[in-house]
Image (tube, rainbow, N blue to C red):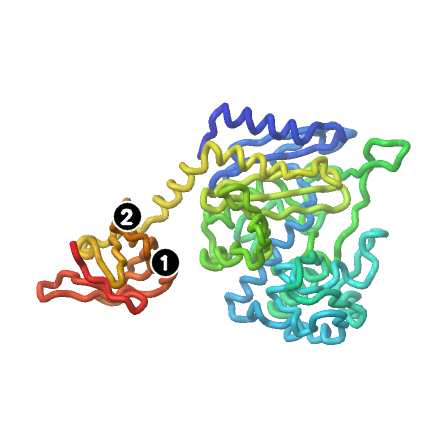
Amino acid sequence: MTKISSKLASRLDAIACDVFDGELGAGVAAALVVDGEVVWFKGLGYSDLESRRVPDQFTTSRVASITKTFTATAIMQLRDAGLLELEDPLVLHVPEFAAARALAGTIEGVTIKRLLTHHSGLSTEPPLPTWAKPEFPDRERILDALPDAEVVISQDSQWKYSNFAFGLLGEVIYRLSGRAYIEYVESEILDPLGLAHTSFEVRQVESGRMATGYQPALEPEGGLVPAPYAHLRGLTPAGQLHSNVHDLARWIAFHTGALGSNVLDSCTLDEMHRPVYVKPDWSWGQALGWRAIRRGDRVYLNHGGGIHGYSSEILFNKPSRVGAITLANVWPPPTRNSAGAGLLDAALDELGAVRGEAKAASAAPQLPPEIEGYLGRYFAQPAMAVELTQTESRLALEPAGSDPYQLHAPCGLAVRRVGDVMEIRVVDGRGAGERLDFQFGIDGEATGFVLGGFLYEKTA
């Protein structure tokens, strides 16, 4: 297990105490996660004001819209199983949606991918009572109300958050899997990942573990009062889950690749985390179910949540496999700034470079001994000098020489056996996925290779 320095622990303590100053009196559970392990934890305030319980790693909260990352994962499972495509129009799987009205854009433009990324143009909520009462409709009422549903802005014109979108994605999961949404997520995601403390029903939470949710009282009384509890019912896929720091650390571990599983393969996880839309200044992006924020040279994948009595946020930096969690039993949250981002910033200031190098080294495959005969300098016209190098079991093409012009370098290379033949392919950059077609002299030594139509001849 990774240990952090006392200096870093003190800095994290200070950040947590500074951001959550305790004025509201509710509780906050804050954690730093490395390789799926909680390496620092701070419980502040009270998870229940009457009993004065201090939150711990197993204190359960409603995590609200973090549920959407589970729904997105389920959709990607169905895509990988060949049951849908991300470009599919919603009406292909939920034909009743054809009755909805397009005030802008089109009904057919409401695709699975746009629903996942909040770019479908769909209204935020279904055309039924929701937050005001609070009372949420079941899936049958949502389907019956589809003739009153509206696409209110053109697809891709701007980011527009939609709980309604994720409720409909839950319907897609139900129809394609043949199982109720909750049953599917429990059996295909929660159980395989060992998320034993994560549930859709409050009655499933272990006795004495549920934090009491609070909200600010109306003036002039001030202070906090217990918040109402409302099941999201037909909007369950948008925000119904309950969880704790322990399980969310495992969720981060799964998404960073620190927790091996067959829930999704690594390529699909990478696809989920890749921004589909970005702001013009590249400070923020929307991926498949996740958001991406840029802080300097670092990118954090994140999702927050807010529901009556509870606020939550999880973030992670994938290259380093470091994440942060904050759970508060009050909504609106006790801070407008992202406490988790501050915790991650502080942690990666100390751990970032080391964690990135450690991951790259641990993930590197063992290369066959004959690869040595392929190493060396190669040159392609008009002026591209590269070097095929091996360092710490990593194979790569690196720029060589003084001319900066390159098409294919730098890039990583992967080696695999195809029968008796050793095959080398590019893993990133312009040539990603393409094979280096080697040429050999009469002595069997490599004399060059063709990549992307260019002949690279060996010079040394």
SS at circle 2: loop
Question: Which labelled disc corresponds to residue 7?
Answer: none
Q: Judge whether 18 appears above or below 201 on screen.
A: above
SS at circle 1: loop
Image spot of residue 89 (x, y percent) = 63, 72
Q: Quadrant of the C terminus?
A: bottom left
User: How many angstroms separate mark 2 from mark 1 (CA)?
Assistant: 15 Å
Q: Is disc 2 surrounded by few (<14), some (14 to 19) or many (20+) residues within 10 Å?
A: some
Q: Judge whether 115 appears above or below 213 on screen.
A: below
The amino acid pointed to by label 2 is Ser
Image spot of residue 276 (x, y percent) = 56, 59
2 vs 1, front mark: 1
Image spot of residue 247 (x, y percent) = 58, 43
Question: Which labelled disc corresponds to residue 393?
Answer: 2
Residue 410 lies left or right of residue 106; in this view the side is left
Image spot of residue 159 (x, y percent) = 66, 57
Quadrant of res 430: bottom left
User: So how many labels did they put on this image?
Assistant: 2
Residue 181 appears in the figure: no
The residue that mark 1 highlights is 427
